[in-house]
Image (cartoon, rainbow, N blue to C red):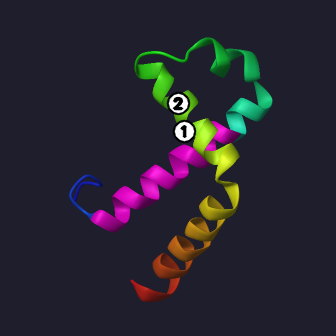
Amino acid sequence: MSALFNFQSLLSVVLLLICTCTYLRSLFPSIMDRNKVGVSGTFWKCARIGERKSPYVAIFCLGMAFSILFLT
C-alpha cells in the first residue's frame, strides 16, 4: 500500500520531511533561505515549522514511533 493511501504512513512521511528539512537548514542555511517560493519553498516552510514548533514536532515524533513500534 502506498504512503498516500495509508494515513499512518502519510503522517510518518510528513514528520520525516519536517525533521529532515530542519536538520538540513541547520547545516546549509543559505540554500534553504534562497528558495522561499515555488516547489523548493515547501522545504523552507517545513524547516520553519520544525524550528518554531519543535516541541510539538518532537512529541508527534515520539507518538508516531510508539505507535509504529508497539501498536502495529
Numbered label tally: 2
Q: Residue at x 45, y 59 (%)?
A: 12
Q: Is residue 21 left or right of residue 55?
A: left
Q: Position of residue 4 (x, y in %)?
A: 25, 52
The answer to the question of whether label 2 and label 1 lie on touching residues, with beta carbons closer than 8 A, is: yes
Residue sitting nearer the eye, 19 or 51 = 51
Q: Position of residue 31 (x, y in %)?
A: 67, 16
Q: Residue at x 59, y 44 (%)?
A: 49
Q: Amino acid at mark 1?
A: Cys
The dot on residue 46 is 1
Q: Amino acid at mark 2?
A: Phe
View extreme (top): residue: 34
Quarter placement of the N terminus: bottom left
10 Å crowding of disc 1: few (<14), some (14-19), many (20+): some
The residue under label 2 is 43
Q: Is residue 18 magenta?
A: yes
Q: Residue at x 55, y 76 (%)?
A: 63
Q: Is residue 54 magenta?
A: no
Bounds of the magenta segment = 7-22
